[in-house]
Amino acid sequence: MKRFLQWSLVVAQIIVSAKLFAAPEHRLTRDFWTSPEFVRSFMGDYGFRTEVEPKVTRAEQQMIGEVVAKAQKDLQEAITYLTGKMSLESSAALDFALATMHFQSDRLGRAAGGYEQAIRKFPNFLRAHKNLGYVLIRQGDFDDAAEHLAKALSLGEGDGVTFVALGYCHYALERYVSAENAYRMAILRVPENKEARNGLVNCLLATDRHREALALLDELLERAPGDVFCHRARANALIALDKPKKAAVALEILRRMDQLDLNGLLLLGDVYHNLDLHSLSLDDYQEALQKQGNLSPDRFMRVAAILIDRGSYKAAFEYLERIEQKFAQGLSEEEDLRLLSLKAKVLLTTGQEARAAKILHDILSKNPLDGRALLLLGRLAWKEGDHATAAINFERAAKVKEYEADAAVEHARMKVESRKYEEAVELLERAQFVRPRDNVGRYLESVRNALAATRANR
């Protein structure tokens, strides 16, 4: 049970801190925007379907033909030519053609404006709604993009690319059920579409259906064993399903593919740590510290805390010193104080009280209300038999909201050692009021029993 709780805590930490493995990145890749399916869906041809697209005069048809010919040679010349021919009375078809050329030139604002103008003139203009949806995705306006893509589908559009784009919009807006439905429709139409299948995987992960995601990923990896997205998503699913051994294998596969980044390496170290493979975990932690990356110092300090908790004090202290070297002057004041506190904790645990006290006083000179330092100084004074100084530090630490409960418990433990059970009970009751915990509750009950026994013997 203890092992399960420890691993569960690490899983929760992973999901918060290792974004790479929380859910593989949800974005439409360059492959989507340059795929033949998208080009066909977006560009189509410059003909128009009368039931869902505007009528064009013979003169306008001729003009569009000239524009297409010019665009094949010089897109900007075609844009200039068509712009000069436009008027408020021009067909929506011309607005559509000009907007499409602006999109090809990556002028998204002008493209959006052109499609909007075409829709104002012809509200049921299917391709204008669809293409405007694509433009809005590029601009990050997923809500409006979804509305226009859905309108295109209601008007009769049925290509898989449009469903992929709609699914992406819903996913970005955290409408996971709608996104899943769109991605499934896309897969029916284009079974091999990478964006559709990746989007469906993300929806399953986002809604905690990890077993279903894992089954799908295993199927996809049979077809494409080298797909990095699938391997990352699979590692995520295995971690969420509390399968650390299989998760370690999945992460090692990514390492051998040279696709395991800094965050992933620390994650692998955490997995090995929870499998009691401490030598492997330390190797990964040390390697991570040497890598370049933009991970915060806090993540590395959590590694040091793990090493301290398992009793690897020498390795933890060396790791903390390497963190100092790695980040040099890049630590914030809060990070610097935390690092010093961890160092002091190691020194106290290994009997180096004088060095620990020096660091703790250094911390308090920078921040007199540092609860960690006050708590550790209280423990140090208690250990040295100076209960008065220890009590002062515990009381000062208790004034820091984050450390109030822990300080009260430590103070109570010192009182119990001195057989001052009544005072200890008051402190423990205070700690439970601030932050109820089962283990503290059990300790409080045992101290109450000791108090009752003492009174009975008087």
Image (cartoon, rainbow, N blue to C red):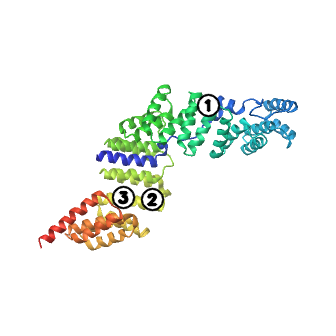
Residue identified by numbered label 1 = 160
Residue 329 can be seen in this image:
yes
Residue 101 screen position, x and y as percent:
76, 37
* Residue in the foreground of this view, choosing between 266 and 238: 238
Q: Residue at x 57, y 36 (%)?
A: 182
Q: Total of numbered circles in the picture?
A: 3
Q: Alpha-carbon distance for marks 3 and 1?
A: 57 Å
Comparing labels 2 and 3, the label whose residue is closer to the camera? 2
Q: What element carries label 3?
A: helix
Residue 446 screen position, x and y as percent:
21, 62
**Residue contact at pointers 2 and 1, CB within 8 angstroms:** no
- Among the 4 quarters of the image, the one containing residue 324: bottom left
Circle 2 packing at 10 Å, graded few (<14), some (14-19), many (20+), is some
Q: Which amino acid does label 3 sit on?
A: Lys
292 versus 82 height, above or below = below
* Residue in the foreground of this view, choosing between 73 and 180: 180
Is 89 situated left or right of 376 in this image? right
Q: Which mark is residue 335?
A: 2
- Among the 4 quarters of the image, the one containing residue 448: bottom left
Q: Alpha-carbon distance for marks 2 and 1?
A: 49 Å
Circle 3 packing at 10 Å, graded few (<14), some (14-19), many (20+), is many
Q: What element carries label 2?
A: helix
Residue identified by numbered label 3 = 343
**Residue contact at pointers 3 and 1, CB within 8 angstroms:** no
Q: Which residue is drawn at 47% across and 56% down?
A: 328
Q: What residue type is labelled 1?
A: Gly
Q: What element carries label 1?
A: helix
| First in sequence: mark 2 vs mark 1 | 1
